[in-house]
Image (cartoon, helix red, strand yellow):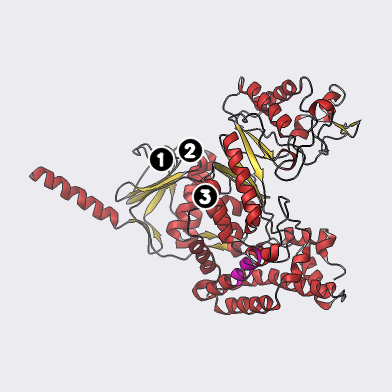
Amino acid sequence: MKIAFLLLAVLSGAFTSCAQGIVLVKNNAAVSGIVVAKDASDQVQTAAKTLQQYLQKSTGATLPIRNTGQGTSNLYVGKGAYSRIGNVDLDEDGFLLQAVDANNFVILGGSDWGTEFGVYDFLERFVGVRWLMPTDVGTVIPKLSTLRIPAVKIVENPVFLSRAISPIWIDKNTTPLNQWGRFNRLRGRVEASHNLKNLFPPEKFSKAHPEFYPMVKGKKVLPTTNTDQSWQPDFGASGIADAASKEIISWFDQHKDATNFSLGINDSGNFNESDNTRSMGRKNTLGFLSYSDQYYAWANDVVSKVRKVYPGKKYPVLAYTFVADPPTDRKVDKDIIPFIAYERARWGAKALKQTDQDLTLRWGQAAQSLGWYDYIYGLTYLLPRVFFHAMKDYLVWGSTHKVKYYYAELYPNWGEGPKGWVLGKLLWNPNQDVDALLDDWYRNAAGKQGGPKLKAYYAIWEKFWTQDVFANGGNSDTKSRILFYDPSYLQSVPDNYLTQSDKLLSDAYKLAETDQQRQLVTRLTQMWTVYRLSVVAYKKYKQGRGNSPEGKQRLQLLQSLKTDQLYSLPANSILSRSTVTGNDW
């Protein structure tokens, strides 16, 4: 009994010591080091340096990076840095954050990616770093004199395994946008792209196998360039599955680390219309002629052939337009991942929500796992197009109905504030409190007093896009997405939305606590000015009062943003499309 009591006392004392936290920095001086294995990969070493740099920016202290633990406390990063960790069930993007005793803390990922994401989570969770938007104006680094890490064990795995957002490619970590995406863990693990033009390039196949190309309106379509995708293969042609599998095997031979190969159709119609593959006039859920049976039978055949050489690979496909429905007479191969293309912001129309949910459920019976392809554009929209709560709702629903992969065309306009940041958080875990996430963003962007003003500003536009545009049956046609180059929605903006927004942004600026917060609110206001002028100028134009002063001012402001680090993408996109450029407004 005494031995047991003594052991309990020792363990209790150790826990109490650990519970007080592990001190990494005290009075702006480092009392800890960062430990990585001697054979750590370049990615883990870079993650450790990033950790070191952000801790230095926050505390002024530089924690030395070394290969063994020394001194008072140690922060271990990556596989092999700390050997006494038991088995943890981690996805390759998942990570463990754990205080293993009173002096040592471990950041460990299911892969090098997981370790890197664990470093970013550590900085967010314990230091308060935030990557709200690209560039320095959106990077928040609190100033701390002492950094103490609590005694915790945190295991995080992503709900959505693939979280890809166009045009963010985090492997190319060279632009502020890509860097922002990487910090926010927007990693795409499979590529759902238009790829059949690459699988059957005309320079290789048009002369040797013209039968692989379609008959359309009685004429053979033979593309003349490798970039032309205004055609689809004849999926019933003799030998076409053998040829495709041979090409894919050769590609995997050259890309040994690749885990997937897209079988996505080209971005067009022009399916083969010969008698043996004609769709027979049957239309699918979205109102297109259905070619699903021919296409997915071909895809199943190709995958089964490649699997004999390369088992375990995945094959994303684009389930949209003419192949939106699952095949009628068979399931798709277990390694095919259908990405169902639909604009889920339109779930505000009950009929469209039901259409997408029913289609997802049907695909859930045909496929082992699903992807969603979404359209959440900022780009050329002339208002902050935000729908935070709707985003959470549909991501929660999808995550419980076999959707594990997500891709969205965002092409951000950062006048939309927290939209991209909140999306990244919800893709990691859609069950989070979206209001808490928003409050976090607003508080870091504009301070404790200015933040609520930003919240009220974006609430106006969330109401517009989730309620107003659906009033009286609007925005409820059967297309999978709305036309983002049509500015007619500007006519329905109430004037008081504009005056309220002006005041809220002005108040947010006045109440902001730091220069950085004032700069960030100024940047949001800059795009708001474009938005407001667009509404005013367009309404005047529709009243027959073209070339208004507001329209001229709007064009001047857009021209000034063409090379802006934050706004060049939407500014150039708006100016490139006549319907939204507004030269005659």
Residue at coordinates 42% horizontally, 58% vertically from top-left?
A: 126
Label 3 amino acid? Trp
What residue sits right under mark 1 in the picture?
Answer: 81
Q: Position of residue 113 (x, y in %)?
A: 52, 42
Left of 1 or right of it: where is 209?
right
Q: Position of residue 198 (x, y in %)?
A: 76, 33
Label 2 amino acid? Ala
Quadrant position of the C terminus in the picture: bottom right
Magenta highlight range: 457-465
Left of 286 or right of it: where is 213?
right
Q: Position of residue 401 (x, y in %)?
A: 54, 44
Q: Are marks 2 and 1 in contact (CB under 8 Å)?
A: yes
Q: Nearer the viewer, mark 2 or mark 3?
A: 3
Residue 421 image-quadrant placement: bottom right
Q: Secondary structure at mark 2?
A: loop
Marks 2 and 1, how far apart at CA: 8 Å
Residue 26 in sight here: yes
Q: Are marks 2 and 3 in contact (CB under 8 Å)?
A: no
Left of 143 or right of it: where is 493?
right
On residue 428, which mark appears?
A: 3
Q: Nearer the viewer, mark 3 or mark 1?
A: 3
In depth, the one of 61 and 211 nearer the eye is 211
Q: Secondary structure at mark 3?
A: helix
Residue at coordinates 64% horizontally, 75% vertically from top-left?
A: 501
User: Is 87 a magenta residue?
Assistant: no
Label 1 amino acid? Ala
Sooner in the amino-acid sequence: mark 2 or mark 1: 2
On residue 40, which mark appears?
A: 2
Residue 411, relative to residue 199: is it above or below?
below
In depth, the one of 55 and 373 nearer the eye is 373
Q: Position of residue 327 (x, y in %)?
A: 67, 33
